């Protein structure tokens, strides 16, 4: 099985979203984290399941939350590049590739 790597900027994306959701309603941030965990587990298990959207980068959608996970899948590693709100301009995450 390939290594599963979450880049530090992607971790910061998740933390910022968690903080925002938790400020909206107690416990909502934890629900967001569960959705991220489910998405990451699906990506890890079936890395080719989601479409390529930009230069070999794939995109997965979170359930219930308007966030997108961008990642690159290679035979040796799956690398999470970003976890961003769906309304955010694509240049935000493309700079990370």
Image (cartoon, helix red, strand yellow):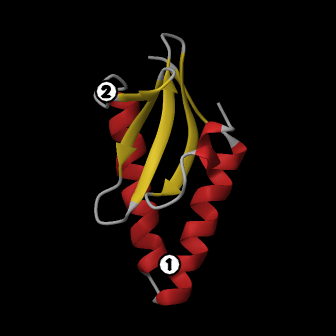
Give 2 or 96, whichever is nearer the viewer: 96
Is the residue marked by circle 2 packed among few (<14), some (14-19), or many (20+) residues within 10 Å? few
- Quarter placement of the C terminus: top right
Is the residue marked by circle 1 packed among few (<14), some (14-19), or many (20+) residues within 10 Å? some
Secondary element under disc 2, as helix, strand or loop, is loop
Left or right: residue 35 versus residue 85 is left
Q: Position of residue 34 (x, y in %)?
A: 40, 61
Left or right: residue 39 versus residue 6 is left
Give 30 or 11, whichever is nearer the viewer: 11
Task: Please report the residue visible at 44 percent of the width from the left and 17 percent of the height from the top.
Answer: 1
Q: Position of residue 16 (x, y in %)?
A: 63, 67
Task: Please report the residue visible at 60 percent of the width from the left and 75 percent of the height from the top.
Answer: 19
Secondary element under disc 1, as helix, strand or loop, is helix
Q: Which mark is residue 21?
A: 1
Q: Residue 77 carries which label?
A: none
User: Could you tell which of marks 1 and 2 lies nearer the N-terminus?
Assistant: 1
Left or right: residue 80 versus residue 64 is right
Q: Where is residue 77 in the image (x, y as percent from the top left)?
A: 54, 19
In the rendered image, the vertical position of residue 93 relative to residue 78, given as above or below: below
* Disc 1 from disc 2: Cα separation: 28 Å
Task: Please report the residue visible at 38 percent of the width from the left and 63 percent of the height from the top.
Answer: 66
Circle 2 sits on which residue? 46
Give 59 or 12, whichever is nearer the viewer: 59
Q: Within the image, what quadrant is residue 81 found in?
A: top right
Left or right: residue 47 versus residue 20 is left
């Amino acid at each position: 099985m390939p290594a599963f790597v979450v880049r530090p900027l992607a971790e910061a994306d998740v933390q910022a979203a968690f903080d925002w959701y938790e400020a909206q309603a107690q416990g909502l941030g934890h629900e967001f984290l569960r959705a991220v965990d489910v998405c990451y587990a699906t990506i890890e298990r079936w890395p080719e399941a989601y479409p390529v959207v930009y230069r070999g980068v794939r995109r997965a959608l979170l359930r219930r939350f308007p966030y997108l996970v961008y990642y690159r899948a290679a035979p040796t590693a799956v690398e999470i590049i970003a976890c961003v709100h769906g309304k955010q301009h694509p240049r935000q995450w493309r700079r990370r590739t």
